[in-house]
Image (spheres, rainbow, N blue to C red):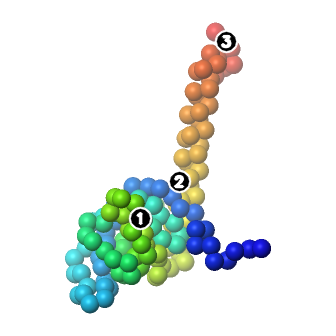
């Protein structure tokens, strides 16, 4: 039997990263929207949301406008996101994108897949190199 209500399953791949992000709170119950952009750090991203480190206290339900540049493409993404929870002991917040074009979501997903492949290739090449050194063989296959 399939459990469609499993909150632990993600709809999209998530990628750990360290990326500067500008953010501005635009909606908080009983508060005036922020006028200035703040600098934060994105530490995880996926097609459905992100995890951010933020310099100000935010609460669940707050709506943010966030903007960041996808590495390698230099394309600016601007999205609206709702704070869905606090995560980690590092002032991290989890946000869900509530307004993001499919074009921009595709850019995020393509970057995440490319980066996962790049990291995997780097990991396997490093492991292979260590294996060769341990076995005493050089890359030509000779034992000399």
Q: Label 1, secondary structure: give it.
A: strand
Taking the spot 39% from the left edge, 69% from the top edge, the residue there is 86
The 10 Å Cα crowd at callout 1, few under 14, some 14 to 19, many 20 or more, is: few
Taking the spot 36% from the left edge, 71% from the top edge, the residue there is 67
The Cα atoms of the two marked residues, 3 and 2, are separated by 36 Å
Q: Would residue 113 appear left or right of 74 to someone viewing this image?
A: right
Q: Label 2, secondary structure: give it.
A: helix
Taking the spot 44% from the left edge, 55% from the top edge, the residue there is 17
Q: Relative to residue 87, is residue 3 depicted above or below?
A: below
Q: Relative to residue 38, is residue 44 depicted above or below?
A: above
Q: Would residue 77 appear left or right of 25 to someone viewing this image?
A: right
Which numbered disc flags the more N-terminal residue, 2 or 1?
A: 1
The residue identified by callout 2 is 115
Q: Position of residue 47 (x, y in %)?
A: 53, 70
The 10 Å Cα crowd at callout 2, few under 14, some 14 to 19, many 20 or more, is: some
The Cα atoms of the two marked residues, 1 and 3, are separated by 51 Å
Which numbered disc flags the more N-terminal residue, 3 or 2?
A: 2
The 10 Å Cα crowd at callout 3, few under 14, some 14 to 19, many 20 or more, is: few
Closer mark to the observer between disc 2 and disc 1: 1
**Looking at the rendering, which quadrant does residue 142 occupy?**
top right
Could you tell me which quadrant the N terminus lies in?
A: bottom right
Q: Which mark, residue 143?
A: 3
The Cα atoms of the two marked residues, 2 and 1, are separated by 23 Å
Q: Would residue 68 appear left or right of 123 to someone viewing this image?
A: left
The residue identified by callout 1 is 87
């Amino acid at each position: 039997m399939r459990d469609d209500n499993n909150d632990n399953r993600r709809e999209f791949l998530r990628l750990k990263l360290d990326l500067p992000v500008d953010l501005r709170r635009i909606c908080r119950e009983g508060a005036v929207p922020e006028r200035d952009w703040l600098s934060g750090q994105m530490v995880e991203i996926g097609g459905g949301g992100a995890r951010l480190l933020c310099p100000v206290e935010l609460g669940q339900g707050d709506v943010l406008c966030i903007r960041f540049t996808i590495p390698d493409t230099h394309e600016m993404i601007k999205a609206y996101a709702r704070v869905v929870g606090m995560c980690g002991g590092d002032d991290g917040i989890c946000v869900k994108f509530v307004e993001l074009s499919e074009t921009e979501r595709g850019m995020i997903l393509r970057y995440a897949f490319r980066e996962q492949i790049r990291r995997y290739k780097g990991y396997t090449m490093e492991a292979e190199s260590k294996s060769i050194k341990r076995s005493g063989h050089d890359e030509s296959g000779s034992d000399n």
